[in-house]
Amino acid sequence: MTENPSPAAIKAWARLMRVSRQLLERAEDALKDAGLPPLAWHDVLHELAEAGEGGLRPFQLIERTLFAQYNVSRLLARLEADGLVEKLRVADDGRGQTVRITRKGREARRRMWAVYGRSIAELVGARLSNDDLETLSALLGRLRHPATPE
C-alpha cells in the first residue's frame, strides 16, 4: 500500500523543484551572458581539478557529477576538443582512460567560477542570513541519499 504525501510534503516538493530549476537557469544565464560555457562544463572541470594530477576515470566523473554516461562521454569529447582536458591511457588497462584537466581547463574553470560564484552569492547568499543558510543546508542534507551530517 502506497502512502500519499501530506499537503505539506507536496508544497515543499513543488517549491524545491521550482526554486532549484529557477536558480540553475539564472546561473546558466549569467554564464551565457558572460560568453562562457554551460554549468555542466564547470562541474566536470571542478571535479577534475579537485582530483589533482592523477585525474579521474570517466566512471568516477559519472559518480561524482551524477550525469548520465552518454552525457559525460559527449561532454568530455567537447572539453578535449577545446583543449580543456586530456585523456591518458591507463597502463594496466588497455581500454581504460584517465581524464585530467589542462592548464587551459583550469583557466576556463577560474573564469566560470568568477561568474558562477557571484550568482550563488546574489541568488542565495544575499537573500538568506547565515543562520538560514546553515538551516537550509542541514535540511537538504537530510534529504540526500545517503544523508549527510549536519
Image: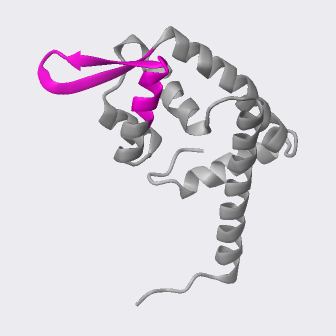
| Quadrant where the N terminus is found in the figure | bottom left
Q: Residue at x 44, y 23 (%)?
A: 81
The location of residue 116, given as percent across then percent down, is 71, 32
Residue shown at 71%/63% (left/top)? 18
Q: Nearer the viewer, residue 90 or 149?
A: 90
Q: Residue at x 44, y 36 (%)?
A: 75
Place of residue 12 in the rendered image (x, y in percent of width and height, measured from the top left): 69, 69
Say how many tags the image has.
0
Residue 130 visible to the viewer: no
Q: Residue furthest front?
A: 81
Q: How is the image coloured?
A: one colour
Q: Left of 58 or right of it: where is 142? A: right
- Give yes or no for residue 78 being in the magenta stretch: yes
Where, by quadrant of the figure, is residue 121 drawn? top right
Q: Quadrant of residue 120?
A: top right
Q: Does residue 22 belong to the magenta stretch?
A: no
In terms of depth relative to the viewer, which is nearer, 150 or 87? 87
Q: Is residue 138 left or right of residue 76?
A: right
Q: Is residue 82 above or below residue 64?
A: above
Q: With respect to residue 149, does 104 lie above or below?
A: above
The residue range painted magenta reads 75-101
- Location of the C terminus (image quadrant): top right
Where is residue 21 shown, x and y percent of the image? 68, 56
